[in-house]
Image (cartoon, rainbow, N blue to C red):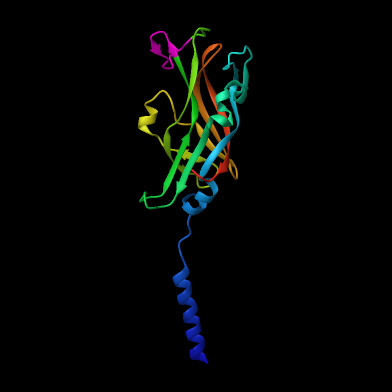
Amino acid sequence: MKRNWLLGAMGVLWLAGCTASPDVAPNDDIDALHERFHGKYSIVSSVSNEAIDVNMDGYASTNLLDEIKELAPEYCCELILHVRGKGQWNTQPVRLMVEAWPEQYIWSGNDQWNWEPLAYDPKLTVNYARQGASRSISFAPDLKSIIVADEPNADASVRWKKPVSVRIVGQHTIELVSRKTIYTRAGTKTVLITTRYERYTMTT
């Protein structure tokens, strides 16, 4: 009887030793991160820290969904998070973020506007192009924010600047704060823009 008890105890210890594994921090659990964050996010709201007249209708507003029609869903301006483990085409886990935003393009005289101070001129035409830069990201240990890496190639451009902050504000909602220079009816303005995105699909 004593021998059987010892063998049983040793068997339990052996099984425990085989199944035990180090705890994985929530911000490093790539499978859980994939399920929660991977996918495409559409714009829920976008507001500036001061009222601006971007659509040139004579009324300034902080609601950029009213001011910039290119932020409407049909223009596919969205946030995309690529979060996946190792696979056939990647030897390391992938954590990338792309914000597709309507960038302004203005032809000023003989040159294209390059974000120099520009006064309002009714003869100028403003065009938009949906563009963005891919950036490496990591997740804060408490999963309340996303840390965006510096990308020299993107940061060298006057467009696609690194966000000021990226917060996780809900199960599938992300809030991104950016500093952008925008041509308005009052000329160029540099404003802080807070945009909330909500995931609508995991397919990327």
**Main SS type for the magenta part?**
loop
x 50%, y 47%: residue:
141
Furthest residue to the front?
Answer: 74
Residue 29 appears in view: no
Quarter location, residue 59: top right
Furthest residue to the bottom?
Answer: 1
The span picked out in magenta is 107-118
Towards the viewer: 125 or 81: 125
- Can residue 66 be found in the magenta stretch? no
Towards the viewer: 164 or 188: 188
164 is higher (above) or lower (below) than 123: below
x 47%, y 56%: residue:
24
Q: Could you say where residue 138 lies in the image, as x and y percent from the top left?
A: 45, 43
Quarter location, residue 133: top left
139 is higher (above) or lower (below) than 159: below
157 is higher (above) or lower (below) than 98: above
Q: Could you say where residue 156 lies in the image, as x and y percent from the top left?
A: 37, 26
- Can residue 114 be found in the magenta stretch? yes
Q: Is residue 201 left or right of residue 112?
A: right
Q: Could you say where residue 84 lies in the image, as x and y percent from the top left?
A: 45, 49
**Count of labels in the image:** 0
Residue 180 appears in view: yes
Towards the viewer: 191 or 172: 172
Q: Could you say where residue 86 lies in the image, as x and y percent from the top left?
A: 40, 52
